[in-house]
Amino acid sequence: MPSATFLHLPPEKRARFLRAARAEFARVPYADASINRMIRAAHIPRGSFYMYFANKEELFFYILEVYHGQLADAAAQILQETGGDLFAAFAQLYDRLSTPKKQEDLAEMRAILQRNAGIQQGQLLHCIQLEEIVRRLLPLVDRSKLLLRSPEELEDMFHILINVSGPALAAAAGGEGQHHNSQGQGKKSGASFFHPYISLINFYALFRKFLSAQATVPNAK
């Protein structure tokens, strides 16, 4: 996390520094990113950098956390647009991330992920605060569209969906979402891409419901 000094900078100075950092991480892979280039572009002395962040790694993951917040904003908006349909929202989020014309606001994130393809599915997901996402999005989900025994099952389903689809969303944001069908024509839509995951999760819900029903049946004498 950034220091209190960084968080209390004038907004313009803080934004200028983050623009310089994002541009550097988008320009070259993480290992080659230069603190010196960042501070020159931001017009700050090197000592100020270490008053803001402990090192380059802390800055890098802070930037990813900011992008995580943007993705959560997008997911919340899409959930509202789909009337709380959880599966449709994830499919549309995938489509939005994998369609260049729809992700101009995420262009820097895409560039950073492309430069750091080896870490996008592991460390990117590691920096995401899953519980925060779940707490924020759960109230927007229409529970009537799901097979649930209890409110707790919705949270379980949410965790499963994020964990199984997270790498796909990260890949889409990184520009790897241009999937083609068996004839090699056209991009695979989010709905078709997520269909196996949706089927699996629905099966999980049905199986849990079946087990619950069986538990209430008296033993035959």
Image (cartoon, rainbow, N blue to C red):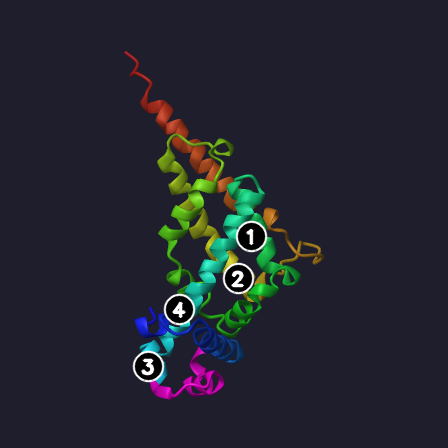
Residue at image point 70% right, 58% down: 184
Q: Earlier in the sequence, mark 1 or mark 2?
A: 1
Crowdedness near tag 1: few (<14), some (14–19) or many (≥20) residues, C-alpha within 10 Å: many
Residue at image point 57% right, 58% down: 97
What's the CA distance linking mark 1 and mark 3?
A: 36 Å
What's the CA distance linking mark 3 and mark 4?
A: 14 Å
* Chief secondary structure of the magenta portion: helix
Crowdedness near tag 4: few (<14), some (14–19) or many (≥20) residues, C-alpha within 10 Å: some
| Stretch in magenta | 30-47
Q: Earlier in the sequence, mark 2 or mark 4?
A: 4
Q: Residue furthest top?
A: 221
Residue 64's spot in the image, x, y percent?
44, 66
Local SS, label 2: helix
Mark 1 — residue? 93
Mark 4 — residue? 62
Quadrant of image for the N terminus: bottom left
Crowdedness near tag 3: few (<14), some (14–19) or many (≥20) residues, C-alpha within 10 Å: some
Mark 2 — residue? 171
The amino acid on which the numbered mark 1 sits, given as a three-letter code, is Leu
What's the CA distance linking mark 3 and mark 2?
A: 32 Å
Residue at image point 32% right, 74% down: 5
* Res 50 label: 3
Residue 41 colored in magenta in the image: yes
